[in-house]
Amino acid sequence: MQNTLRKNLYLPILVVSSLMLLGCSSGPRIITNSDPSADWTSFRTFGFFEPLGTDRGNVRSLMSNTLIASTTREMQAAGFALSESNPDLLINFVVSTRETIQTRPSSSASMHHSRGRYNTWSGWSASTSTTEVVQRTEGTLGIDIVDRARNQLVWEGAATQRVTDSTRQNQDQVLDDAVAEIFVKFP
């Protein structure tokens, strides 16, 4: 009975805490860079590199398919047309991960003073905390857009965020969201 009561009390607290953490989590960090000499009014069509940086040799990866669909949607929304032959712009993707290690001191420390019985012994004692080490995986998606005629990079965007079990399980949605956020800063 007591365990059931405790379980029923802790479950709402756990759910509310989880929702608060999700609400506090931020999306990816977005960085973009554009060639100031690029004449965007002269570009009308786009296509994709063959093979893409996210392909595996001569095999189109599932990740590439997701990125192509998301980028096609964003480019068409910006007024560009997909072209299989001689596009004005060529698009490539780069995906990478890196392991990071963070250390942070724990916030607990204490100091005690005790007095011996009948004033025979007294002294001070102190305790400090240990350092917490956290290993994380950070993933980056890069989108490169190249002026095919000049063979020159004219725009690049990148999204970087922490890779968790949830992002791995929802890879297509995470990639789609990252592409949409990168293209918010597209010229």
Image: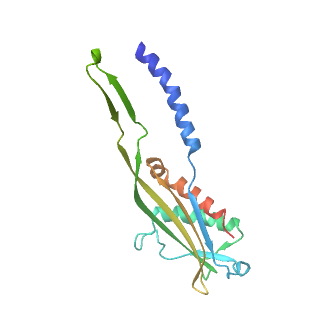
Q: Residue at x 43, y 39 (%)?
A: 107
Residue 12: where, in percent of width, then height? 53, 26
Q: Residue at x 57, y 52 (%)?
A: 27
Q: Nearer the viewer, residue 48 or 100?
A: 100
Q: Quadrant of the N terminus?
A: top left
Tell whether 117 sits left or right of 5. Answer: left
Q: Nearer the viewer, residue 17 or 123?
A: 123
Residue 9: where, in percent of width, then height? 50, 21
Which residue extends farthest left? 120
Tell whether 175 sits left or right of 42. Answer: left
Tell whether 139 sits left or right of 111. Answer: right
Residue 182: where, in percent of width, then height? 61, 63
Above or below, 47 relative to 116: below
Q: Nearer the viewer, residue 152 or 108?
A: 108
Q: Residue at x 54, y 64 (%)?
A: 67
Q: Nearer the viewer, residue 85 or 162?
A: 162
Q: Residue at x 61, y 83 (%)?
A: 86
Q: Quadrant of the C terminus?
A: bottom right
Which residue extends farthest right? 41
Residue 66: where, in percent of width, then height? 53, 61
Rendered image quadrant of residue 73:
bottom right
Which residue extends farthest top? 1
Tell whether 69 sits left or right of 42. Answer: left
Above or below, 115 relative to 79: above
Above or below, 153 relative to 20: below
Above or below, 57 relative to 178: below
Which residue extends farthest front? 119
